[in-house]
Amino acid sequence: TLIAGLAVRQDVCGLELSADLGTNDFNANWLVQSGVEGETLLTDVGLDGADQVVALSDTGIDVRNCYFLDADFEKPTEDLDTNGHRKIAQYWAYADDTDEELGHGTHVAAIIAGNKSPDGTFEEPGVAN
């Protein structure tokens, strides 16, 4: 087998099996709110992050990602506009103006931003509604 072949090579120090990695954002709500599976104390009393403006410094945002896609706005600007883009009020491209597909900045911002929009118009529930 491949593993047996690699194990006998002098330039291979060790081998181990690992589980498939993936994201588990569907657990984020109850983890940060109570630590008890299914208990969302803040959401249950109406605190869902609606109408809040949050600052984030990270690698960038892929504005074509379903969490930020807006059919009416191609790209947000450095000018603050809370009535413009569906999710992004202002975007300063400190390092770059994009984020690689599945990038860290997009991932973190999507957790914060909440609802996703597969077509840029209709929203589906996300982590932070």
Image: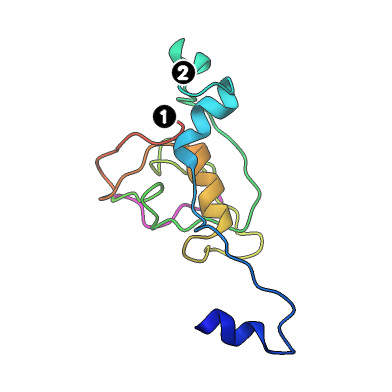
Q: Of helix, strand and loop, which one carries label 1?
A: loop
The numbered disc on residue 33 is none
Q: What secondary structure predominates along the stretch shown in magenta?
A: loop
Estimate the x, y position of residue 70 in percent, counting from the top left.
33, 49
Distance (Cα) linking label 1 and label 2: 9 Å
Identify whether 92 is placed above or below 53: below
Magenta stretch: give its range: 72-79
Q: Using the image as rendered, state which of residue 26 and residue 120 is in the foreground.
A: 26
Q: Of helix, strand and loop, which one carries label 2?
A: helix
Task: Check if residue 24 falls in the magenta segment.
Answer: no
Identify whether 52 is placed above or below 74: above
Measuring 66% from the left and 64% from the top, which residue is drawn there? 95
Q: Using the image as rendered, state which of residue 122 and residue 41 is in the foreground.
A: 41
The residue carrying pointer 2 sits among few (fewer than 14), some (14 to 19) or many (20 or more) residues within 10 Å by Cα, namely some
The residue carrying pointer 1 sits among few (fewer than 14), some (14 to 19) or many (20 or more) residues within 10 Å by Cα, namely some
The numbered disc on residue 129 is 1
What residue did someone put label 2 on?
43
Estimate the x, y position of residue 59 in percent, counting from the top left.
62, 58
Q: Earlier in the sequence, mark 1 or mark 2?
A: 2
Which residue type does callout 2 highlight?
Thr
Determine contact: label 1, label 2, CB under 8 Å.
Answer: yes
Q: Is residue 54 visible?
A: yes
**Location of residue 53 by image quarter:** top right
Measuring 55% from the left and 63% from the top, which residue is drawn there? 97
Nearer the observer: mark 1 or 2; the answer is 2
**Location of residue 121 by image quarter:** top left
Which residue type does callout 1 highlight?
Asn
Identify whether 107 is placed above or below 47: below
Q: Using the image as rendered, state which of residue 23 and residue 94 is in the foreground.
A: 23
Estimate the x, y position of residue 79 in percent, counting from the top left.
54, 47
Q: Is residue 81 visible?
A: no
Identify whether 129 is placed above or below 79: above
